[in-house]
Amino acid sequence: MEIPSKYDPKSVEGKWYDYWMKNNFFHSTPDAREPYTIVIPPPNVTGILHMGHMLNNTIQDVLIRRARLMGRNACWVPGMDHASIATEAKVVAKLKADGIKKADLSREEFLKHAWDWTDEYGGVILDQLKKLGCSCDWDRTKFTMDDDMSASVIKVFVNLFDKGLIYRGHRMVNWDPEAKTTLSDEEVIYEEKQGLLYYLAYQVEGSNEKVTIATTRPETILGDTAICINPNDDRFGHLKGKRVVVPICGRVIPIIEDDYVDMEFGTGCLKVTPAHDVNDKALGEKHQLETIDIFNDDASLNSFGLHYQGKDRFVVRKEIAKELEDKGFLVKTETHINKVGTSERTKAVIEPKLSDQWFLKMEDLAKPALDAVMSTGDVKLYPKKFENTYRHWMENVRDWNISRQLWWGQQIPAYYYGDGENDFVVAETKAEALTKAQAALSAKGEHRSLVLEDLRQDPDVLDTWFSSWLWPISVFGGILEPENEEVNYYYPTNDLVTGPDILFFWVARMIVAGYEFRGERPFENVYFTGLVRDKQRRKMSKSLGNSPDALKLIDDYGADGVRVGLLLSSAAGNDLMFDEDLCQQGKNFANKIWNGFRLLQGWEVGDLPQPEASKLALEWYDSKFNETVLEIEDHFSKYRISDALMCIYKLVWDDYSSWLLELVKPAYQKPIDKTTFDAVIQVFENNLKLLHPFMPFLTEEIWQHISNRKPEDALVVSQWPKAGNVDMGLIKEFEFTQEVIAGVRTIRKDKNIPMKEALELSLLNEEKTPARWDVVVKKLTNVSEISYINAPLEGALSFRVKSNEYFVPMSGAIDIEAEVLKITEELNYTKGFLKSVQKKLSNERFVNNAPEQVVAMEKKKVADAEAKIETLEKSLASLQ
């Protein structure tokens, strides 16, 4: 097979990926081997490949390919998340562009559009992951809306409801007015924003006195149902039991007392709007206040908004402030920094809203999951620093709001059979619900007969995370068939690779689900990647325009180049400052390996005795390789994937390419002995095995070029090298030899002595080194003879390696006349420089007025120049 002069990723990557797929190398079924299982963090069905995905999935692929090479039954399950909010928003936007309103569609009609959109656009990211080289078991691809996955979610909901852990409650929730759905606390991002603090005057009923309150949201006065003062605040003692008139709407509301009020904030008086603030809601319940909701679902004002009805809340804020000012109610405004909650998905400002929602009690469920990380160590987090965050969340866990006001997702399996608040049943199917509803009626003494059409299913869907928290179990059918062969073989999984931003959203909840539904952990190790940032440390985003096109990077640098570029700078849990130069570095590395292979293939092999230098070099490299394998395995055990790659990088670039190949390379147009050549090929193949998880395409291409192999002998399913004997004495001896070689090379460079001109080397030996390394020194430096002396050689150049001094006689090796001229010129320049600095230091005005560090710097220049002059004069003397 002819070897191209240049490595071309474009002609290689598709070829080998198709080959791997054709031979089913990525597919796994249960067998006698030890399993190694990873489940992919399912990307949104709406998603396309970005830098975060590339980093995360490259790390997973490294782990799964290495496990495959180690003989384990490697199973990497891919899939997608239906992403209720994000996907529904995209479908609604597409419908709008087509002139269709969601409100004009039935649920069934809308879901048909959603499935059409999913079929057309969904799964794009999975195809893109193939271009990156991800070796997932694509036959196992799961979607959180697959029939069996949805059935698993419904079964779990019914199970938890029957245990009394799921309930329906009227609570203050986070409302996304753009998506028109509730969000969990974890889906709200709080940002500090500058706004205004409005001071408003309320008329005390029946008097001319006014009470001033401060608020950041003047539009919500239309929902005020009380003014609250602190009972210990002497300023307002005379107002106890009185009432005030709300500006503009004229509603009369009571003044109540509660020590919740901060006497130092604002004016010390607090307006209470129970429908629009969680703390106000608590005050309202405590003091039995009326609750007035002034907003529609899209955060426009409803009929309680009077003449502002139908207008957006932020428009009303400006307009009502103007009206309050015009009517004399606005006392003043001040700038104010406030934390504003925004939706993680739509970026809309969250509105606190009272709503009937479904909740899951989390306190008891969280305890085994907390212990698994913090006490027993059954689940380990890497880096360990994330344990504190995990503990904080799990010790302060709140009930999980699991319902969403959407149509795309698993519809909540609650069926209403009457008009009462509790006239519902929960069942996996409508038929089962009918049976339960009939029984519920009978229990109440009602004997009317129900039919399926009498049941109304709750219109809400479940939070997307309520399906993905089951992911490690449900992808193996472990909810519907808890004792099936696959879940018993592959579960618990081994490693999870994800971002720290979903530590609670997903990771913690999966651990909760694992203990609740399987009685054991879902995975053993969680590796948290950092965020990918640009060189200015900004998070990559479409809005900033700083996120490169992932596919273009692969096109420009090759998948292997991009993988190496990402991994070299991605220590666990630390953010990656992405720079395209990293990908260029990865591409250069691929080219280095390719060129090294071409060098090998260009050698003629002859039936010759093995040179001593080659034999010694191979012995050294064997130890160096084994030492590196041990280092790599240590890094993998600690999830230091970047460090593992750097070890291999240095081994291949420095030890193999720069040293071993040079040591065994035959003389120009001479053959290499077969013993050495075969050994070097074996060494190279072992290097390829170590590299394969990181650079799968390049390594498979070279592996197949080396020999005509059967599919079962492909690199992807070969065997990971095992560390053999490490002779540290040998390694240390060669390190010493490398320094000797470097010393001779420096003399050649400094004196411009060509390699073709042989040198002699003399050693003033204080630290005896084995003479066997002399052959290596001679080969790499063109030293004709190495002698041992008892006294320094006059007129020779020298260098030191530890306690040994080496001398290189210069007679005949250099042009004495040219060298004298060169040293004389440098000596004269240095003397002139010394005089100029000494002159500056003899100036008392300079010495007395210049900063101390400046004077010290000038004195150091004098000392350095004097030392250099002494050295140059000695060198000159030795040549004359």
Image: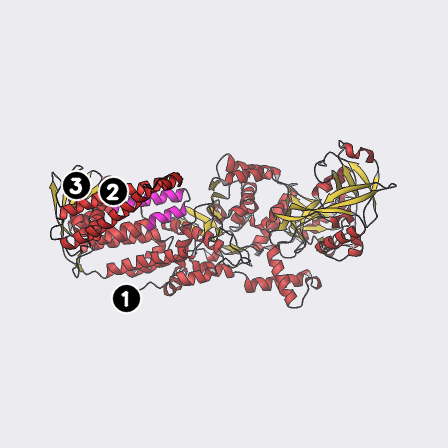
Q: How many marks?
A: 3
Return the residue found at the far right.
206
Residue 647 part of the magenta-drawn span: yes
Pick the quarter of the image with the N terminus: bottom left
Image position, residue 234 (x, y; %): 77, 32
Look at label 1 and name its amino acid. Answer: Glu
Kindly identify which residue carries mark 2: 866
Task: Give the left or right position of residue 411, taking residue 126 as reference.
Answer: right
What secondary structure is the stretch in magenta mostly built from? helix
Q: Is residue 10 above or below residue 80?
A: below
Looking at the picture, how far across and down is residue 261, in whole percent?
72, 36
Residue range highlighted in magenta: 622-649
Please indicate, yes or no, whether residue 208 appears anywhere in the rendered image. Answer: yes
Q: Quadrant of residue 600?
A: bottom left
Residue for badge 1: 2
Label 1 to label 3: alpha-carbon separation? 43 Å
The answer to which of marks 1 and 2 sits earlier in the sequence is 1
Whole-angstrom CA distance, mark 1 to mark 2, is 61 Å
Left or right side of 774 for 592: right
Mark nearer the viewer, 1 or 2: 2
Up/down of 664 relative to 398, above or below: below
Depth check: give the residue in front, 515 or 88.
88
Estimate how packed mark 3 is, as few (under 14), some (14 to 19) or many (20 or more) residues with alpha carbons within 10 Å. few
Which label's residue is closer to the chain start, 1 or 3? 1
Question: Which mark sits nearer the N-terminus, 2 or 3?
Answer: 3
Q: Nearer the viewer, mark 1 or mark 3?
A: 3
Please say if the residues under marks 1 and 2 sit with CB atoms less than 8 Å apart.
no
Check residue 770 in the rendering and tell me which mark sits there, or answer none: 3
Say which of 217 and 161 sits in front: 217
Q: Residues within 10 Å of mark 1 (few under 14, many from 20)?
A: few
Q: Is residue 275 visible?
A: no
Q: Toward which corner of the image does residue 633 lie, by quadrant?
A: top left
